[in-house]
Image: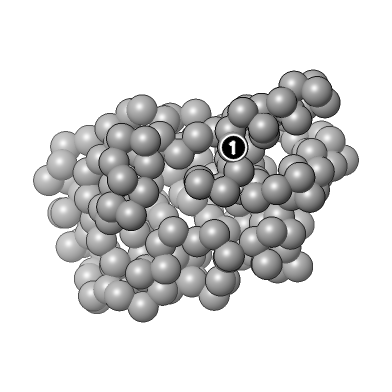
């Protein structure tokens, strides 16, 4: 049984799959409280559904790309069964995780988007650093950057752990409305950082407060 906040069909706004149609399965509950969180409604709102019910809802959209997100999806035990069964049905499955829960039990075929928390989030002390050892070549690492301190933290982590050759992408995403993308771009260019600037595409298509996109 899973507690589901929402299931919806939209445009993928992040990762190297940005711009593609995608079905999002948002699970309820998170044990982090990041300062810039834009999905606080997923902390508590949701209803119980079986794995079969979730799969049926996903399949109604007839879309090959599915993202499991939250909240923090790895807080719910049945998420592992959900991911495995979606893979068995031929779906490309992505997992968006806050980076503080171990990813070693996630099916290897799943594309893991691992969010490393920077100091500006208020949760940097919760990072599960072993996750960087469990990355697969198709996985991606994301840093949400609020200011220069966050940028330097992300830069140093990416370089110290040699992330660029070990995963599909290192993503630096400015906090929407707080850090100008041009400023972050200039910092990255000045350091010749082997990373990708990521904008939250969905927030430019729809208003940032819009739910279910």
Image quadrant in which you'd find residue 98: bottom right
Image quadrant in which you'd find residue 101: bottom right
Whether residue 120 appears in this view of the structure is yes
- Residue 125, percent from left and from top: 75, 68
Q: Please give left or right for residue 37 compared with residue 160 in the image.
A: left
Look at 35% across and 69% down and name the residue there: 41
Look at 22% across and 71% down and name the residue there: 49
Where 2 sits versus 67, above or below?
below
- Residue 155, percent from left and from top: 79, 39
Q: Please give left or right for residue 21 compared with residue 18 in the image.
A: left
- Residue 37, percent from left and from top: 50, 61
Look at 75% across and 35% down and name the residue there: 163
Secondary structure under badge 1?
loop
Whether residue 137 appears in this view of the structure is no
- Residue 96, percent from left and from top: 49, 51
Where 159 sits versus 8, above or below?
above
Look at 28% across and 55% down and name the residue there: 211
What residue is shown with label 1? 180
Where 178 sits versus 70, above or below?
above
Q: Quadrant of the N terminus?
A: bottom left
């Amino acid at each position: 049984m899973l507690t589901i906040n929402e299931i919806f069909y939209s445009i993928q706004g992040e990762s190297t799959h940005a711009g593609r149609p995608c079905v999002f399965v948002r699970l309820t509950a998170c044990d982090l409280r990041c300062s810039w969180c834009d999905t606080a409604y997923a902390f508590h709102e949701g209803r119980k559904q079986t794995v079969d019910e979730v799969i049926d809802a996903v399949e109604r959209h007839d879309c090959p790309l599915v993202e499991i997100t939250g909240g923090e999806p790895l807080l719910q035990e049945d998420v592992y069964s959900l991911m495995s069964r979606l893979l068995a049905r031929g779906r490309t499955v992505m997992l968006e995780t806050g980076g503080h829960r171990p990813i070693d039990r996630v099916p290897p075929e799943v594309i893991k988007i691992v969010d490393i928390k920077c100091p500006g989030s208020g949760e940097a002390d919760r990072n599960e650093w072993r996750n960087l050892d469990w990355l697969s070549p198709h996985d991606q690492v994301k840093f949400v950057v609020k200011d220069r301190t966050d940028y330097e933290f992300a830069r140093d982590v990416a370089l110290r752990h040699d992330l660029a050759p070990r995963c599909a992408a290192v993503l630096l995403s400015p906090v929407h409305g707080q850090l100008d993308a041009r400023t972050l771009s200039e910092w990255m260019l000045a350091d010749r950082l082997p990373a990708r600037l990521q904008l939250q595409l969905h927030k430019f298509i729809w208003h940032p407060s819009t739910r279910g996109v």
